[in-house]
Image (cartoon, rainbow, N blue to C red):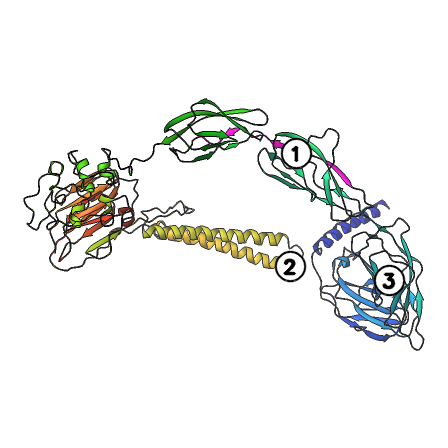
Amino acid sequence: MKKIFLPLALIGILSLVLSFFAISAFADEKLSPPEKISPTQNQKNVPSTVSFEWKSVTGADKYEIVVWLADSNQEVAQKAFTKTEKTFKLEEGIAYWWDVRACHATGLFGWWNDCEKQEFGGRWEFTTKGTAPLEIVTTKLNNGTVGLKYEEKIVIKGGVSPHSWSVKEGELPPGLSLNPETGTIKGKPTEWKASPGWKFKVRVMDDSSPNPQIAESKELKIFVSVTKLEITTSERLSPGAVGENYNVALEAKGGIPPYEWESAPLTGDIYPKGLNINSDGTISGVPLKGGNFRFGVMVDDSFPETLGALKQFFVKIESIPLKIITTSLSAGDLDKEYFVRLEAHGGTPPYSWSKTAGTFPNGLNLSNGIISGTPTKEGTFTFTVLLTDDEETDKAQVLAIKINPPPKCGNKVCESEECTTCPGDCTIADCCGNGTCDSAVGESTSNCPEDCGAPSKLCGNGTCDPGECRSECTTDCAVADCCGIEGCNTVIGETAENCPKDCAALPPTEAPPGDGAIKIVKGKLELAWPNSPMGTSLTDNSKLVDFIKYLYEWGIALGGLAAFIALVIAGFQYLTSAGNAIKMRDAMKRIQSAVLGLLLLLGSVLILNTINPQLTTLKMPPGLSETELKPIEIEEKKGPSVECQKVKIYSTAGGSASIDPDTGCKSLGAPISSITIYGSCEVELYSQKRDCDNQFLVGAVRYVAEGNMPESKEFTNIKNLIKYSDEEAYSVKVKPITY
């Protein structure tokens, strides 16, 4: 007996194990719903012994058929079996629904099925032949909740459609109503009532002719309750900081919205100063003191019978050290209104300010952190202010205010330095003899030779000789000759408009186009691209071959990354497709394609590297050179040019230097503000303070003096004309232009 039992036991265990794996294999495989044949949709007068038929489904082992009373989920018949037809005996004159679904028979002997995981195709309705007595099937209704949606259909059977419904006795809960055509009770209850709730009976009448049938329900009842009101926000609120805005919204559920919130003092409460509990459930404000706080909050709903909810919360407010932000003050002017607000942060507001040491400017006052008033004495005043917060913490800061004297220019008194800066206060009589030819007040060689020198003996020779810009020799010199030389030469017509460099602190104007002036601009390439995966980077000096190599390396890396991602996705699809042969086959194809892509990508790189390593390193082949970018040169030939004489360079520091074609390369120690070219010259600018022949050419400025053009030309706004940084020093070379 034992010899027989042991093999049988092993077979049983093996059967269970195989059944388990068989169930798992079909766990995710869905079958299509069978196509229903009869009874057809909305078929009438079907014999009460109903024969149900449907078409078979590929892969299905069993079928489950279910029959319900129409307009309800009340099952009257259900069966799972292997055939595609089934007969049930049903009542006469009743409307039914029916549906069927295909299933797998799982386990070693088909002991289980997966019908519950399969889908129906959609219920069909039919009515059996005959007239059944009208009857209300529903005997119990679901309970409701105040404020929540309620919908319940009263089920009937028999009779002749359509039907009409009404409440015979009792009443429905307030907020609910009975649909007279469908028999559905729906709405939102507005009142609650303790057990047994609202009691009532309903009546239904059919359309039988000539005598309609009437059915009455048993006593029905609906108990309406109210959900418990509770605060759902965690008791530990998000932390805040002193002096910073704080805002947290509390939440609740249950009861009947809207809710009303308020503070609820509890024993041991310490409420954070500066915060408020608002009626909408938000806690907001600006904390005034740091520490750990706890406090109670209560919420109530709009239903009088609901009990409110109470909860205690905890919040931590971080303290910020007291600090005076203002560390310097703007200067003021004598007899002019002054206003400055001192700024502070941290500590515990409110703050108080006071003066503790030093000298405060006459006419100014400190009040509530504001320094204001009208200074009555010039000079620099240093003093100390003391900041105290609400916790009596102190912080001191040393400050200084400079009160400037009133401007001297315009007071009709000629000071020594005003001969050049304030000609409105000075005349020739005031300034002549101070050793400087102050052309701003009208000094010249004729009216003040002791400052400006004797009149030139060369006046009238048609050439603007040195010294004639300050004289009255207007026949030899023009504005173009003298602008930038020996101050503002008003005698020969210099003004703030045509020579701002000499005559006024006005913004310089760019040289107009034409007039033989050619501006050559050459800038640098500015790149900020990331390095390639192989380490190649692009810089200002990158060549075309560098761009090709950069794109090549990114293409190899991105192609490999795309193939790897495709391989991971396909592998995941394969692992999760157990039991589905089609999905597993598709996933395997994707895996093969991704692996093939990786192999092709790697193989192409190896083959190219084997044939010629330069094919993958992308270096410029020997014998070829890369042409550097040269300045664009545009010239207009209008006739013989005037010989290049010199170029005068003016720096932003106020200095100047004269360079002629024989000087060679000259290094400048400061940025350039303007260039004046005398004759037909080309000025080349280089980026380093070394040999011009070995450095990067930033740009060039050319001027061709020909025909009736002036023999000299000034170029301003060099920074805008030639793209270079004014933080660098530059080397200059002058070349003559000849035809």
Q: Do the residues under discs 1 and 2 have CB atoms within 8 angstroms?
A: no
The answer to which image quadrant residue 517 occupies is bottom left
Instruction: Give coordinates of residue 42: x percent, y percent.
Output: 80, 73
Residue sitting at x 79%, y 73%? 40
Label count reads: 3
Element at label 1: strand
Q: Which residue is mark 3?
A: 154
Instruction: Give coordinates of residue 132: x percent, y percent.
Output: 92, 71
Q: Earlier in the sequence, mark 3 or mark 2?
A: 3
Seen in the picture, residue 274 relative to 130 is either above or below; the reply is above
Seen in the picture, residue 629 relative to 75 is either above or below; the reply is above
Left or right, 273 with respect to 736, comes to: right
Left or right, 302 with respect to 356, comes to: right
The answer to which image quadrant residue 685 occupies is top left
- Report if residue 344 is visible in the image: yes
Pointer 3: residues within 10 angstroms few (<14), some, or many (20+)?
many
Element at label 3: loop
Amino acid type of the residue tagged 3 in the rendering:
Ile
Instruction: Give coordinates of residue 393: x percent, y percent.
Output: 56, 24
Q: Which residue is mark 1?
A: 315
The image's mark for residue 173 is none
User: Which residues make up the magenta segment?
Assistant: 305-333
Pointer 2: residues within 10 angstroms few (<14), some, or many (20+)?
few
Amino acid type of the residue tagged 2 in the rendering:
Ala
Q: Nearer the viewer, residue 642 or 537?
A: 642
- Report if residue 624 is visible in the image: no
Left or right, 501 with respect to 116, comes to: left
The image's mark for residue 581 is 2
441 magenta-colored: no
- How far is disc 1 from disc 2 in space, using C-alphas? 58 Å
